[in-house]
Image (cartoon, rainbow, N blue to C red):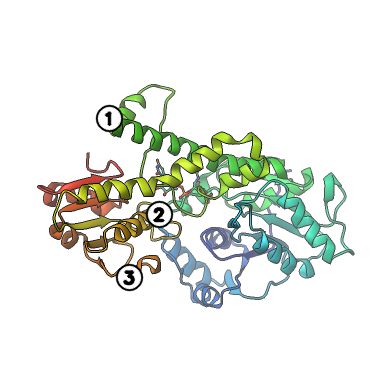
Amino acid sequence: MNEIFTGRVAILGMGYIGLPTAVVLATRGLEVIGVDVNAQTVASVSRGEVPFIEPDLAVAVSGAVAMGRLTATMETPEADAFIIAVPTPFNGDRTADLSYVKAAAEQIAPRLRPGNIVVLESTSPPGTTESVAEWIGALRPDLRIPHNGDAGADIFVAHCPERVLPGRIMIEMVTNDRVVGGLTRRCAERAASIYRVFAQGEILLTDAASAEMAKLVENAYRDVNIAFANELALITEALHIDIWEVIALANRHPRVSILSPGPGVGGHCIPVDPWFIVAAAPHLSPLIRTAREVNDRRPAHVAEQVVSKAQRFRSPTIACLGLTFKANVDDIRESPAIEVVDLIAEALPDTEILISDPFVDTIPPALAHHANLRLAGSHQAVDCADIVVLLVEHEPFKALRHTRLGGKVVYDTRGTWR
Ligand code: SAJ
């Protein structure tokens, strides 16, 4: 009991989850091989470099590579354990696209030997871990795969959903509790031995479908709570009451903890994962679906408010501060701020719009077709603007209020300058 894994680990997917996981295992002495289909990613990890910004990750990667504990390759090697950390985006019909997970399982299958562990970390709909075992089993009839609770299998298959918060990945990777759901109890125990190498939080063993669902529920919970805040923002706006004051007061109740409204919910997790629950039980999930719809409507509402403020001017300049999907990260994927800027630029083609973000140094491709957009430093953008729209509460923007905002129309979608 409470065994701790020793051996070689292959991690498929060197992204926001796979690379930090590789590093924490490597820095605890394991031999880790990162596998990725992208040659540039493999080249940069091999040089000890990180292709994205995440606090404390770069120094850990360069150290692990320099020590020879972490290497990267495009070919899936033989290993004692395989961790799948590839994306699970959604299809046009909002069901999960499991093609990357299936491809990873099919790359692992020929390398498997009896006693190997396969862990799915990618956020997935209930039943996906079972499918991983089936995909492997179809290619390896010589191995006994743990279907349907069969206790005497050659390979141990489990789900251990990642739960780390971008911006705090290196801390949460180590301190968060981990949920490990096995296709059998033994699968869960074997997979847990890997996380015991570095996890300081508790490791909670369960079945695979419960682990899959728990992860989706965590993100749906956050989405519903943010949707509640966003709906309250609409109501208080109509009633001319300050939403930030209302939430601050309500949150002083010992059992109330409302999240913050904003220009929408972005990133590649929270706007996606609740749909996996809706797809699994469409007639039983009106609340989760509605929350998604409330949050998806936010960028359009924020853009409409800006356009209506602009109509008070003859020829205004608008500064939009923040382009990333949330504060203090460089990630612009699924960013509501970009959607807001896009809608404003579309609605006001003759208005000059200055965009500024300390983490973004070129105009994002989704905005490149607008002739009325220009990238600027935040001071320059604010100084030139009649209307200042705060879309992302990056740390450097917080200091602006004292010095530069006087006399401007300010629309602070994050409550930062209250
Ligand atoms: N947001 C608000 N109001 C809030 C909080 C967030 O509008 O009060 C917005 C953010 O600006 C952003 C979006 O929601 O656009 C999502 O940001 P986030 O910080 O809530 O979450 P993510 O996507 O960075 O990470 C989430 C986390 N899940 C939970 O906190 C339950 C993280 O722990 C997960 O590991 C991650 O999803 C994931 O990969 O699933």
Q: Which mark is residue 322?
A: none
Q: Earlier in the sequence, mark 2 or mark 3?
A: 2
Name the residue nearer the viewer: 283 or 111.
283
Most extreme residue toward the right is 142
User: Which residue occupies 49% across, 43% down?
Assistant: 293
Closer to us: 385 or 170: 385
Q: Disc 3 designates what residue?
A: 362
Q: Tell me the distance, in whole angstroms, between the alpha carbons under discs 2 and 3.
A: 16 Å
Of the numbered discs 2 and 1, the one sitting upstream in the chain is 1
Around disc 3, counting alpha carbons within 10 Å, would you say few (fewer than 14), some (14 to 19), or many (20 or more)? few
Q: CA distance from mark 3 to mark 1?
A: 36 Å
Give the labeled residue for mark 1: 245
Label 2 beta carbon within 8 A of ligand 1: yes
Please give left or right for residue 335 compared with residue 353 in the image.
Answer: right
The residue that disc 2 covers is: 325
At label 2, counting other C-alpha atoms closer than 10 Å, the crowd grade (few under 14, some 14-19, many 20 or more) is many
The residue at 71%/48% (across/down) is 3
Question: SS class of the residue under badge 3?
Answer: loop
The extreme left residue here reads 407
Can you see residue 140? Answer: yes
